[in-house]
Amino acid sequence: MDAVSEDLDLLPTTRRALRHRIAIAQSEGRAPSVVAAVARGGEVVWEGSRTSVEGHGPDGNVQYRIGSISKTFTAVLVMRLRDEGLLCLEDPLEKHLPGTGAGEVTIAQLLSHTGGLAAETPGEWWERSPAALRPELADVLGEEPFRFRPGRRHHYSNPGYTLLGSLVEAVRGKSWDEVLRSEVLEPLGLDRTTAQPQAPHAGGWAVHPWADVMMPEPSEDLGLMAAAGQLWSTTRDLARFAGFLARGDERVLSAASVREMRTPAAPPEPGFADGYGFGVQLTDTGGRRLAGHTGSLPGFVAGLWLSEADDVAAVVLANCTSGLPAATVAAELVAIVADAEPPFPQPWRPFKEADPVALELCGPWYWGTSPQVLRLKADGLMELAPVSATGRAARFRSEPDGSWTGLSGYYAGETLRAVRREDGSVSHLDLGSFVFTREPYDAQAPVPGGVDPQGWRGIG
């Protein structure tokens, strides 16, 4: 049996641990209902729910409002425009959506919440008031849309994603939800993700903080703010969407583009531990790197996290305004599965035909006196890593001119070159001006600063 597909099903002990965690979440969070799903290898491997209603609970087909997870969908639409060459992320908004009063901010800054815009709209609480109060972008941004100079710091902005939704509409010539449906939801088969609720769906509730009573929350159409938080979805759809965020889908976005979305583009907000990519929140929990998004609107909370390293994703949805920490519970569901049932590694396979030039470069090198090892991996990438447990490690992609470009870590974007002598033999490696030699401070290589002519010696 192939090791990759060998046993997607979870063990009974793991399933019980997942059920136990959401039971605690629903009870302690005092939520009318909570529904959750876990995916592994891109497939839903567990679903569960708890409810205060006798007789049955919600399943993976019941819609809940997902709030700001909608932003990730909007970011996907913007990245599609970039990949089609219709805009550049460095473009100022004014180039494609003139007259907003916030035209100096770039598209990348809007995606990463570094545009300096206000967190919320002026006037009434937009999540609980009619969209008719904000018929134009001027009503969303107000007279003073900026709180900071663009690019200076991360500051989460709902109006910023309203601008991105309007940008999508301006470039495509269609409404945000029409574009989303035709370009993302239909290709990915997310037929239970919609701008308006479709039965079966949960109702949103506010639970009294000091008494076990509750009342219904209003469900407003967000109008221009839709791109920031309008969507309704299910755990099954969101689990499938998490798989897309991990792997990409050429019908929507490539693996490289979704990886770019998951790459840190903004530092954490002061006082918070999370970073942000392009429409994707990033966090480190228990030594595990997670990507996804949280969401809330009156009556609903939501959390979606995926661990690329573990190939596990979890979604938690609940119909209460506060109390149940959906994002925290989703992260814990990922950890339960990843820790109890770590993934099988891909089987080792040799190259069918290795690059002889790359093969020539493999083996030990020295940066000064620091031993490094250059390895050629079966995926065609070069991996440079220190021999010791700490240091700068990176992977490199080959280029047509014979050089290699760094893909990760300190050397991301830097160029690795093999410098040859007149006879064609390799003298040394040049990596962003650093010289790597076959021997520590090799006297035959052009080590910056030179090598003492007396060479290595002891004391005395």
Image (tube, helix red, strand yellow):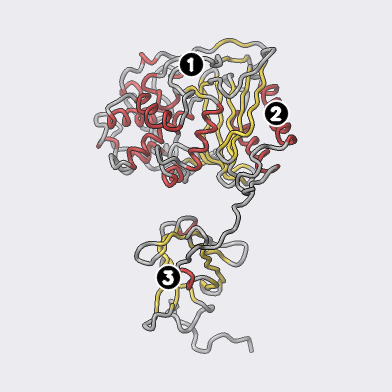
**Disc 2 versus disc 3: distance between alpha carbons?**
54 Å
Q: Hey, what amino acid is under mark 2?
A: Arg
Location of the C terminus (image quadrant): bottom right
Query: Going by the image, does 296 lie left or right of 449?
Result: right
Q: Nearer the viewer, mark 2 or mark 3?
A: 2
Q: Nearer the viewer, residue 356 or 145?
A: 356
Query: Going by the image, does 387 lie left or right of 164?
Result: right
For disc 3, the marked residue is 430
Residue at 65%, 11% in the rendered image: 213
Residue at 48%, 38% in the rendered image: 244
From the top left corner, tell me how far across and down residue 331 is, in percent.
61, 36
Residue 144 position by quadrant: top left
For disc 1, the marked residue is 198
Q: Earlier in the sequence, mark 1 or mark 3?
A: 1
Q: Earlier in the sequence, mark 1 or mark 2?
A: 2
In this picture, is 111 found above or below 420? above
From the top left corner, tell me how far across and down residue 193 is, in percent.
47, 24
Q: Earlier in the sequence, mark 2 or mark 3?
A: 2
Q: Nearer the viewer, residue 268 or 235?
A: 235
In this picture, is 371 found above or below 11? below
Residue at 69%, 13% in the rendered image: 55
For disc 2, the marked residue is 19
Q: Hey, what amino acid is under mark 3?
A: Asp
